[in-house]
């Protein structure tokens, strides 16, 4: 489907979720939205060299991550999955440290958080998810891998190889493509032949679903079903969350060069946060007091993370050498001495 | 400076004024190449409508049309691979790989296809491809946006490799590369994109320099500093400092990393008897080893000290605050000079 | 479909072709079969270091190549497309020189033959075909590229990137996958998730057809339609020719380690040559005299090529340096002198 | 010898008898690794049912099961990429890339992922991956089946690189690599697969050699020949010839191409005062430059002549009849020795 025209499915209301869950999703989305705004501000203030905003994709990220089993599953993100990290309980100061360029992969513990290090290679982490999932199957465990990637990444050879491999091995992995309409300056028409990433799944013999990516409940339900299927031995599947990159590609980007503000406005009408709020209200699952409290508490949390990452100490120069090998080499020790004498 | 900082580029296709930035100079070179040869094509990720994340291709699509300057999907291997087919069909492709670290997915097509097709076809299949790769570090960019792959490219039979150090030379080198009927990997020093300073003293009217020619950008007699890309400027800074202590350093800008100017290296070091090679890439198996070997082979009897190497450390290219700790500093260059003089 | 079980479509008879064409296809298939046998013999005699037989795939190769316009189109082969070369009129002594290891790419003129140099990188040439095809479109010419690859190659990232690129650019290219059931020792089940390469086409928004690859007429018709479509601006399409690698992967391979002879026997019953002969006879398009003459003339041609490649001179050592660059470098000239003095 | 020649391999997991071929020795090392650590996995193209095109993995699937030794689709990038995920999930992957030339499609995953994950995760994500790559030339194979990528691998921060020269050492080095908790690229010299000869005089009980240690396989005093993989044997042949003329050549087998044994190189050349480094890869930016630089840095005052390099030429690896013209010959090695002695 051409970028900008929201998919038909977006008109249908998402399936109803338990009130408690709906409220949790909303609160997490709100925290993500507020923290995202803080991050953009930190970049403007020069605290972050650059930042990649996920604004508009909160429902796709929170909805998909909330469906994961935090004890068993493992997420493989790109560089834009801040709300996934938040949903999975990753140390957000450590996560944001990646955007402050304190450490490329972030300063959180990826193994303990079951959320891989931030990965800047488009398509690169997708085969990792398949390998991790195969590892679960080989070990007779029941965890699933969730592989996050974008519409642009779907053009990379690694993504194809990973999907085919997952199909052949029956690996318990869920491929979550956030199709936000744009890969930097290139819209879907110039990126995804055929127009649908979900449609690729059939070619690998796995289920592929396109869902309204701005409806957290719809995403939660689709990813939940895919996880259930993978967990019960049904193999991989693909969920394409149709959403929109409401912000520029990064704080250094200039959308005026390549996209029509009208498109942004049309998608603004489908902003996942007001929608979630409206749904909660319509269902009578939340009252004014809830929204007031949520606003306050989420803002406090966003500010806590903002202050934490701003205050985080820079890693010492010696960290250059700290994690290159687990079994140190004499040559690197020698270079460390050179650094100590001439730079450190 | 961020990897997608915005900016503007010149329009006209004449040689850039000395005060043009390297981005403007490169933009004009591409504009001229597109103008002079209708077979020239510019394509890659975000090079069309956006004009490139560094604006090096800014305005080219508007001026030359969507058929000759176009965006591709996010597929580095196919970008390099389609260049092979386009070249075999009479075109002169100038693909861009958006960043150094993302040249790896295209490496199989570059090494096993682009670099070999002329050989494989016994000279019948033309391969006038210039692969532009914004390269090297120094701009506090995300991971994989500060890599230096020159040692990899220079090792590949059938490839030529260029790396300019200033705006004026970038213009000349890029035009020379695109006009070449051999495949060239063109490594653009991101850290110099916004720079207007040209090298003080080109040894020759650079326009006449053949493929493979280096140039002495500062004359000196006590030791030779060898560098390319952004490190040339750093060596010139080091030479300034050294001059204050009466140490006269010669600075040689290699410009071409394949073929390498072994004669130029030997000539300079036979005079100065001492050499320091400086690069951003990790030390081990970096191009500094090759340069050191060439100098030693070409000037052994005159060498007063072993060639010194000042390079990045054997660690993954680090994030922001550690970047200045990783890259060769003026101090490290001067320490190395001291070691050669001490000997 | 699991390897070994020939597809249902194989039961249906292929569409009828003009008698003259049917006879030409048969003769070319026969020459390929006989030349293939000569090549295997040359390897046994030590004239070829190794050889990759195409036995069983004659219909897929001859049928597809015969549909091409030799004046306008261009073929991008792998290492197993001998019968494609033969059909396109490539200098076969020059082609076979590649198997004698006289020159990796072969000694024919690929540009004049409109048949790219032999390419040993699985999947590697597929993006070349897309680039060539785009070049035709940009030039306003009407040629099409035909990209040959195997079932195993379909797992490579390059093939995915090329198909997506072709779809996005609307490049006039026909992807011809010869699914011969095996990628060296790995059958389709272990290679192609979902079991069908043709089914991948839909994901790129292009037509994909699986045809009986042992029926030259069926392949000719399917590829002809795909070429017609591409030539008239309809963009890329994919034809999967379901066939069988009747011989080992190469003369150095040992199929007893990985496949059941019963499978080979079941496919032997579908050998494209007897089938083509039967079809000619059934249609009354050829008589005994024709088959006798064909046998004799094709054998003569196969022997001519065999004798030619056996007698071909080895390239001089100086050819090491001859075609590395079009604009020679001093350094390579220096190395050539070293070679001259110390080796040549 | 063809790239898929058949053969048999030993079964038991004890150290190979001196008379075992390198293929058998490697097979036994993998067998032992699979036996001693249930987390070890062997996978790649045709390594399972077929037992590998060189039969190095022959019988392993039968003995250790289809879950621990398995075939993958034809996807080099995914083979390397899945190793990352498997390692992060507690496994010890030993993937095979079927041939050197087909390591390029996997290079992005090797360089940008396998080699960096431990660093990127600040030491939390384990990456005990050993990537086996049948490498180098000399077997009259098709294009892309005779490449030497050691200079590329050795340049990558976070990678270690090993290349054995004989059967017994291949067994020890492969076990040492698989047991290492760091990623190792293990380059197997195809041309020696069928070879039974072990090196005459290991300088030490090799079992005790740490990662990065080279070994002197022949003692001499007039010059040091430095090599790895199949070129070690060629250097030993050259040393035999030289001995007839009373020239005593020392032969140093590097074994580890990263980390490099700079101390071992310096120690040897300080004694012999002359060195020749020999490799199959093209000369320019080959590992020979690095070795030459290390020797010159470590033994400058003792060097009687510039380190000589005998390498493949800067041309694509050629087909059959040209192969012996491309690869370093005994003659070329002896000419280089003469040059160092002449100086
Ligand atoms: C292999 C690779 N190529 C190019 C880039 C540069 N780059 C970073 S993000 C991006 C666009 C990615 O688009 P998409 O996959 O849709 O993800 P989104 O940014 O929309 O979240 C590009 C081209 C990269 N990081 N990795
Ligand atoms: C990129 C790459 N990986 C591995 C190989 C080794 N190899 C050569 S042919 C082959 C099997 C190819 O199978 P398929 O694509 O089905 O073609 P077929 O041999 O059946 O014609 C393999 C693994 C190669 N040549 N290129
Ligand atoms: Mg996107
Ligand atoms: Mg096949």
Image: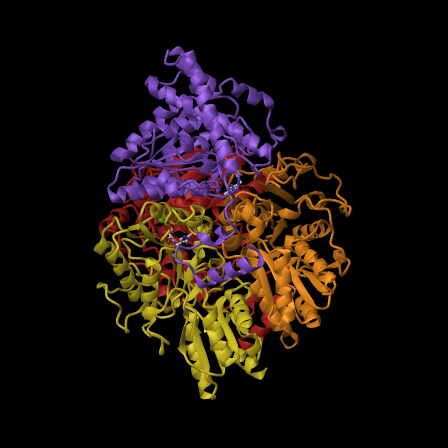
Chain colours: A purple, B orange, C red, D yellow
Q: Nearer the viewer, residue A81 or D251?
A: A81
Count of all numbered marks drawn on residues in the image: 0
Residue B211 location (% of width, % of height): 67, 59
Asked whether, in this view, residue A332 is left or right of residue D68, the answer is right
Q: Looking at the image, is A77 positioned above or below residue D121? A: above
Occupied quadrant, residue A29: top left
Quarter of the C terminus of chain B within the rendering: bottom right
Q: Quadrant of the N terminus of chain B?
A: top right
Give the image location of residue B336, x and y in percent: 61, 64
Picture quadrant where residue D134 is located: bottom left
Q: Classify C323 as above or below B127.
A: below
Using residue A29 as the reference point, say whether residue B309 is left or right of it: right
Q: A78 above or below C52? A: above
- Percent of width and height locating residue C281: 33, 44
Between C199 and B335, the one lying in front of the other is B335
Residue C71 shows up from this direction: no
Give coordinates of residue C127: x percent, y percent: 50, 45
Q: Is residue D159 left or right of residue B16?
A: left
Look at the image and tell me whether residue A319 can be seen.
Answer: yes
| B145 versus A204 height, above or below | below
Q: Residue at x 55, y 72 (%)?
A: D296
Residue D145 quadrant? bottom left
């Amino acid at each position: 489907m051409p970028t900008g025209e929201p998919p038909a499915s977006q008109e249908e209301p998402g399936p109803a979720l338990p009130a408690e869950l709906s409220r949790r999703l909303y609160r997490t989305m709100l925290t993500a939205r507020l923290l995202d705004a803080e991050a953009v501000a930190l970049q403007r203030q020069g605290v972050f060299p650059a930042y990649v905003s996920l604004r508009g994709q909160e429902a796709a990220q929170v909805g998909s991550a909330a469906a994961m089993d935090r004890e068993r599953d493992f997420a493989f993100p790109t560089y834009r999955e801040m709300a996934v990290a938040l949903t999975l309980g990753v140390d957000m100061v450590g996560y944001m440290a990646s955007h402050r360029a304190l450490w490329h992969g972030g300063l959180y513990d990826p193994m303990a958080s079951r959320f891989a290090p931030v990965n800047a290679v488009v398509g690169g982490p997708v085969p990792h998810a398949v390998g991790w999932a195969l590892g679960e199957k080989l070990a007779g465990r029941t965890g699933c891998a969730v592989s996050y990637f974008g519409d642009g990444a779907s053009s990379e050879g690694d993504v194809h190889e990973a999907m085919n491999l997952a199909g052949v091995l029956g690996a318990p992995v869920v491929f979550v493509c956030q199709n936000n309409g744009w890969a930097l300056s290139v819209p879907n028409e110039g990126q995804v032949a055929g127009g649908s990433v979900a449609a690729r799944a059939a070619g690998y013999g796995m289920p592929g679903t396109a869902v309204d990516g701005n409806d957290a409940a719809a995403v939660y339900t689709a990813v939940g079903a895919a996880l259930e299927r993978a967990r019960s031995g049904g193999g991989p599947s693909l969920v394409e969350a149709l959403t929109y990159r409401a912000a520029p590609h990064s704080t250094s980007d200039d959308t005026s060069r390549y996209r029509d503000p009208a498109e942004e406005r049309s998608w603004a009408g489908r902003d996942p946060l007001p929608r979630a709020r409206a749904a909660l209200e319509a269902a009578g699952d939340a009252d004014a007091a809830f929204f007031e409290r949520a606003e306050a508490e989420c803002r406090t949390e966003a500010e806590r993370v903002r202050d934490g990452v701003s205050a985080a100490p820079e890693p010492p120069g010696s960290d250059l050498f700290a994690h290159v090998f687990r079994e140190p080499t004499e040559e690197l020790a020698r270079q460390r001495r050179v650094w100590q004498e001439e730079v450190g | 400076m961020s990897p997608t900082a915005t900016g503007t580029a010149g329009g006209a296709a004449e040689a850039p004024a000395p005060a043009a930035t390297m981005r403007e100079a490169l933009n004009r070179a591409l504009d001229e190449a597109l103008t002079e040869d209708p077979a020239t094509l510019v394509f890659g990720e975000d090079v069309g409508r956006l004009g490139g994340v560094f604006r090096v291709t800014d305005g080219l699509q508007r001026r030359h049309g969507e058929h000759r300057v176009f965006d591709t999907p996010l597929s580095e291997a196919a970008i390099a691979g389609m260049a092979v087919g386009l070249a075999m069909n009479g075109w002169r492709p100038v693909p861009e790989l958006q960043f150094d670290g993302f040249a790896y997915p295209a490496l199989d097509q570059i090494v096993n296809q682009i670099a070999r097709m002329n050989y494989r076809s016994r000279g019948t299949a033309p391969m006038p491809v210039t692969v532009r790769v914004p390269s090297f570090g120094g701009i506090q960019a995300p991971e994989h946006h500060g890599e230096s792959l020159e040692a990899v490219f220079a090792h590949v039979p059938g490839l030529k490799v260029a790396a300019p150090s200033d705006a004026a030379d970038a213009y000349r080198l890029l035009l020379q590369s695109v006009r070449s009927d051999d495949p060239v990997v063109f490594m653009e020093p991101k850290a110099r994109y916004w720079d207007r300073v040209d090298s003080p003293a080109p040894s020759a009217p650079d326009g006449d320099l053949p493929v493979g020619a280096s140039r002495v950008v500062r004359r000196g007699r006590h030791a030779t500093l060898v560098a390319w890309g952004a490190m040339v400027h750093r060596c010139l800074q080091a030479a300034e400092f050294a001059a204050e202590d009466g140490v006269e350093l010669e600075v040689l800008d290699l410009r071409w990393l394949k073929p390498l100017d072994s004669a130029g290296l030997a000539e300079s070091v036979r005079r100065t008897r001492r050499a320091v090679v400086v690069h951003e890439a990790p030390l081990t198996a970096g191009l500094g080893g090759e340069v050191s070997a060439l100098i030693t082979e070409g000037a052994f009897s005159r060498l007063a000290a072993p060639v010194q190497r000042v390079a990045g450390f054997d660690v993954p290219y680090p994030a922001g605050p550690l970047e200045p700790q990783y890259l060769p500093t003026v101090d490290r260059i001067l320490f190395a000079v001291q070691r050669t003089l001490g000997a």
